[in-house]
Amino acid sequence: MLENYIKTGRRKNAIARALIKTHNSEFNNGKIVINGQIAEKYLQYNPIYISKIYLPFEIVNYEISTSEVIVKVKGGGISGQADAIRLAIARILCAINANYKPLLKQYNLLTRDSRIKERRKYGLKKARKAPQYSKR
């Protein structure tokens, strides 16, 4: 039984499209591939980012070795990309089994963090930083 699930996750300027192929095959090793690289290498072996993307699987006790995870991610930095991947994976797990939804919701993994950088306004140095005021 081969099934594919595709979902999108976003954070800041990062957009991640995750695909999980679930099937009962002996050839899967349960690795996550991001943009053609193993997840650990793509996330620069940073334990914080690596634990972020594996967190949804650990919460619902999903056996990752039974599936293959392929992620395409673009935009933003590595931190935003890791959060986008985590959201995409959590959404896929909800599509696989609806019973996972309350658990993932309890850990706020299904909530999209919509905070993005504010745009720069004319006459200012940054979004809100104004040039120094001189009275005389």
Image (spheres, helix red, strand yellow):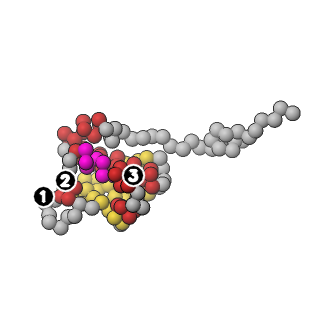
Residue 41 appearing in the image: yes
Q: CA distance from mark 3 to mark 1?
A: 34 Å
Residue 113 percent coordinates (x, y): 42, 41
Front tag of 2 and 3: 3
SS for dot 3? helix
Marks 2 and 1 close (CB-CB < 8 Å): no
Give amino acid for label 2.
Glu
Q: Quick check: is 96 in the magenta stretch?
A: no
Marks 2 and 3 close (CB-CB < 8 Å): no
Q: Is residue 15 left or right of residue 56?
A: right
SS for dot 2? loop
Label placed on residue 1? 1
Residue labelled with disc 3 = 48
Give amino acid for label 1.
Met
Residue 70 percent coordinates (x, y): 30, 60
Residue bounds of the magenta highlight: 53-59
Query: First in sequence: mark 2 or mark 1?
Result: 1
Quadrant of the drawing holding the N terminus: bottom left
Residue 48 percent coordinates (x, y): 39, 51
Compared with 28, 105 (above or below) is above
Which residue is drawn at the image coordinates 20% and 50% (left, top)?
Answer: 62
Q: CA distance from mark 2 to mark 3?
A: 21 Å
Residue labelled with disc 2 = 63
Front tag of 3 and 1: 3
80 or 48: nearer the viewer: 48
Label placed on residue 56? none
Q: Is residue 42 left or right of residue 116?
A: left
**In terms of secondary structure, what is the magenta stretch mainly?**
helix
